[in-house]
Amino acid sequence: MITFMKRAVFLALAGTLLACSSAPAQSPSDVAARVGGRAVTVKELDERWRASDAADQAETIQKLYDGRRAALEAIVADALLAEAAKSRGLSPEAYLEAEISKRAKPVSDTDVAMFYQANVSQMQGQPLSAMAPAITRYLTQQQEDEARLALINELRKTGPTVRVLMEAPRFEVALADTDPSLGNAKAPVTLIEFSDFQCPFCLRVAPTLKKIRQTYGDRVRIVWKDFPLTQIHPQAFKAGEAGHCAAEQGKFWEYHDQLFGNQQALTPDDLKTHAATMGIDTQRFNSCLDTSKHAERVREGVAQGTRLGVNSTPTIFVNGRRVSGAQPYEVFAAVIEEELSKK
């Protein structure tokens, strides 16, 4: 049941956050209601909402932006395709079909067999021969989607100039001097990663973050925040503690790589073994881990992420802009380039 306070928030912010009607957007200084002689502003509603349910507010704001940005990208793509098709004397549909056919790689029997073997646990006991048609359709669609995206990216460089003026929501993520980080603290772009050592998607994004560091060098800084999903990753919390124990000896990132390379071995004994193989002072490390010295730091990471609407890992804030999931390098690069262009 929606509480009275939330009902008031939703009604007052319909034109601002939910934008479902044609009502004009309201600024923070606008009056949402009057109670006798007292004016209640939109800013006051926002502050009250944040105080009562910061995660819900952050999630709502982000979803609104994501929906609008997806619609914007679709409109931009249609416009670029229409312009390119016109220059070739073709319809947008004919132009797109011709360009995709040049870019999409045909799906081979080997591709299908490899996909089947990699996902055999999800095939419900069906043999390759039964699943091959569905796998072929899936891989073909995947190839076409990737080809279309590559085409749109090319057109953004060679076609009409595209300038995105819509501002993304930004969330303030408090940093501590003790947060593990890579790069210059004064870098123009900071990526703050809420992550979990037992999370396979966090493992998947790790090479992407390394590529970002290699590509952008001192222009980016990467900061680690703990967000162990203990309900599905029971060993992640202790692994988070272990990371900070390694950090005490200046070995956080080396240990970070060691844990991600051994996600099936994260018991307390495993954590100690990993430390021993890296030249870490084991007596000091083991004492740190056994006494749960950094448990509160891990809990604070979870609390901080929850307030920001984080509900999955990895979630990365790029100068305060939220990017959820193990997105490909190109997604992060696009956001980073936008941020660098503003500096």
Image (cartoon, helix red, strand yellow):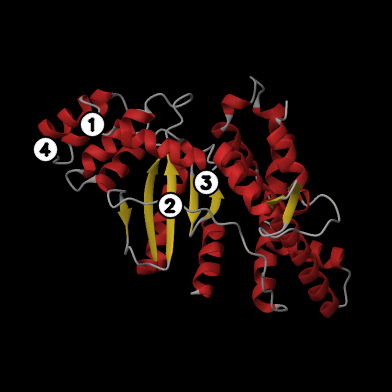
Mark 4 or 1, closer to the camera: 1
Mark 3 or 2, closer to the camera: 2
Left or right of 215, for residue 68: right
Left or right of 251, for residue 23: right
- Residue plotted at (41% across, 67% down): 216
**Of marks 4 and 3, which one's residue comes earlier in the chain?**
4
Q: Position of residue 162 (x, y in %)?
A: 69, 74
Asked whether the viewer can see residue 91, the reply is yes
Q: Residues within 10 Å of mark 4 (few under 14, many from 20)?
A: few
Q: Secondary structure at mark 1?
A: loop
Q: Position of residue 297 (x, y in %)?
A: 32, 37
Cα–Cα span, label 3 and label 2: 14 Å
Q: Are marks 3 and 2 in contact (CB under 8 Å)?
A: no
What's under tag 4, amino acid-wise?
Asp
Residue ranking furthest to the top: 125
Q: Label 4, on which residue?
A: 281
Mark 4 or 2, closer to the camera: 2
Q: 306 and 68: which one is in front?
A: 306
Q: Which mark is residue 321?
A: none
Q: Position of residue 180 (x, y in %)?
A: 30, 49
What's under tag 3, amino acid-wise?
Ala
Q: Which mark is residue 192?
A: 2
Cα–Cα span, label 1 and label 2: 23 Å
Q: Label 1, on which residue?
A: 293
Q: Secondary structure at mark 4?
A: loop
Cα–Cα span, label 3 and label 1: 30 Å
Q: Which mark is residue 326?
A: 3
**Of marks 1 and 2, which one's residue comes earlier in the chain?**
2
**Of marks 4 and 2, which one's residue comes earlier in the chain?**
2
Placement of 207 over or under 82, stated as above or below: above
